[in-house]
Image (cartoon, rainbow, N blue to C red):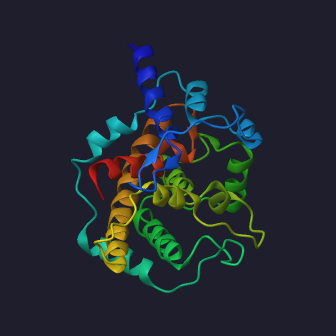
Amino acid sequence: MLMLRWADCACDFVSINGPNLRDQRTGQYVSARRSTPTAPASAAFRPHVFTMFNRLFDDPPPTLRDMTEDARGQSEVPPDQAATIINGGALHRPVEYSPGDWPHFDQGFAMYERLVRSAWSQLFSRYARRMEREGRHRLLVHGLVAPTSAIDSATAAELGWAISWLSPAQVLAPETGFFTPAFGLAAWLARIPLRPNSIHPQAWRERVARCLLDDLCFSAKLWRRMAAFMSTRRYYLLYGDAVSPTALAIRRAKDSL
């Protein structure tokens, strides 16, 4: 039974990295063969999330499918809180990264990133205490693995969520004056369908913002569930792929945006 659970967990995580090419006619991703079997050199320094789960835990973590079935029945974010988050994302505050350094990330992306940061301040302010910069840097150096004695479950859930939607560099790295866009958000946006010609761009942006908010709130629930599982073991594994924005976007695309 335990091996079957691990096999189910493997299918859940490995399937996230399946298709990698967008069909320009349909806007959907399709499978494509890689030109070389070798992985990027950077992959050697951070093993796959499933590999790390298998190393750290005797039993598999809850799968995205299982957590989805449990969390869907819970109440959604209250309307007043949703309005606060959306309004915070709409404010024309400058993003931290320099648009000149990242020319492919336009003002539309900046609006969605502000929404992510607005959600961050709203969804976790009552649950987790902030981790000091020194502790965050230590977590980055130690490969996103922290002993359960070092942080509590609520803090682990917040950090895991932020790493998922922003990046380890944005959340954990020492301040150097060089900032990156929210790469988890970029992965989510890359997986949603293209805008149909029949929908006005402004109406589409509003729809995407609402769907993004739903997934931000949903993934916060999933990270709390994942952190609760880890809290009864020896370690927290705070890989962004543990509750992947990519996987959430793929599931949303299947249900239609």
Q: Quadrant of the C terminus?
A: bottom left
Query: Which image quarter holds the N terminus?
Result: top left
Q: Position of residue 46 (x, y in %)?
A: 69, 39
Front position in the image: 92 or 26: 26
Quick check: 35 above or below 193? above
Is residue 129 positioned above or below 229 on the image? below
Residue 25: tell me if it is visible: yes
Residue 148 makes an appearance in the image:
no
Is 108 positioned to the left or the right of 181 in the image? Answer: left
List x then y, in percent, for residue 132: 66, 61
Q: Is residue 67 left or right of residue 53?
A: left
Residue 17: x and y in percent read 52, 39
Q: Residue at x 58, y 36 (%)?
A: 33
Quadrant location of residue 119?
bottom left
* Residue drawn at x 58%, y 44% as measured from the top left: 239
Closer to the camera in the image, 89 or 111: 111
Residue that lies at the very extreme toward the bottom in this rendered image = 92
Tell me the residue at 75%/47% (across/down). Answer: 141
101 w.r.t. 234: above or below: below
